């Protein structure tokens, strides 16, 4: 995979405000925060999107994510927050290295704004779709 701004942060070539590090993951403050405490959690593995990530890195992220959330809550005093993970440019991914945003939501005007253009799920189409998805795990 080609080098990204996050691999340069991991190698120390670009500075950051580090929050947490272990052998598989790294967390640091976002350079353009949506709210105070906006933190990024990344795997050290250089995967572009979540579907390309190893189970080991995914497990390491999952273990640490609640701890990062607790630290952000404790320090900001803000108990509401969003966790966001974008995959692909069309889905607003700007940096091609898996990253989870932890974004405090202190007020309606700060933090992440979410568009949610929900439709209703047709029962028959839903049954077919879920069956096809289950086949992927066989
Ligand atoms: P994405 O849109 O890919 O989900 O989010 C990428 C995030 O990386 C953005 O929130 C952006 O502010 C952050 N970012 C981009 N370049 C840098 C950087 O050099 N340092 C830090 N700390 N964050 C960065």
Image (cartoon, rainbow, N blue to C red):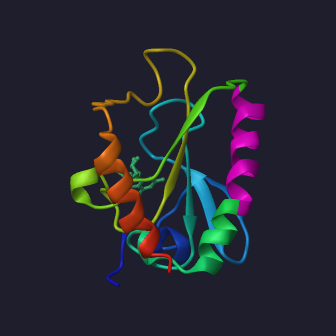
Q: Which portion, as a residue range, is magenta? A: 63-76
Magenta stretch encompasses residue 105: no
Q: Residue 66, can we see it? A: yes
Q: Is residue 64 left or right of residue 80?
A: right
Magenta stretch: dominant secondary structure: helix
Residue 70 in magenta stretch:
yes
67 sits to left or right of 91? right
Residue 96 picture location, percent across and down:
34, 67
Measuring 71% from the left and 78% from the top, which residue is drawn there?
Answer: 23
> At x 28% / y 49%, what residue is drawn?
125
Q: Quadrant of residue 82?
A: top right
Extreme residue toward the bottom, this view: 1
Question: Nearest the camera: 84 or 95?
Answer: 84
**Which sits in the foreground, 25 or 53?**
53
Q: Residue pushed farthest front?
A: 124
Q: Nearer the viewer, residue 9 or 135?
A: 135
Q: Residue 105: x and y, percent?
A: 55, 25
Horizontal arrangement in the rendering, residue 2 relative to residue 7 (left or right): left
73 displayed left or right of 7: right
Considering only vertical position in the picture, is 71 above or below 114?
A: below
What percent of the width, then of the height, locates residue 12? Answer: 54, 73
What residue appears at the point 43 percent right and 75 percent down from the top-left corner? 136
Q: Is residue 5 visible?
A: no
Q: Residue furthest left?
A: 90
Q: Is residue 117 above or below residue 94?
A: above
Residue lying at the far top of the rendered structure: 108
Q: Is residue 18 above or below residue 57?
A: above
């Amino acid at each position: 995979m080609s080098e990204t701004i996050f691999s340069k942060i991991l190698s120390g070539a670009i500075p950051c405000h580090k929050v947490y590090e272990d052998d598989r993951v790294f967390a640091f403050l976002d350079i353009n925060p949506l709210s105070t405490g906006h933190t990024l959690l990344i795997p050290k593995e250089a995967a572009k999107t979540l579907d390309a990530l190893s189970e080991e890195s995914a497990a390491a992220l999952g273990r640490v994510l609640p701890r990062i959330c607790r630290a952000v809550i404790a320090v900001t005093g803000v108990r509401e927050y969003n966790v966001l993970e974008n995959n692909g440019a069309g889905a607003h991914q700007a940096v091609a290295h898996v990253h989870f945003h932890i974004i405090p939501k202190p007020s309606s005007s700060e933090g992440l704004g979410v568009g949610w253009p929900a439709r209703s799920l047709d029962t028959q189409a839903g049954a077919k779709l879920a069956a096809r998805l289950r086949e992927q795990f066989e």
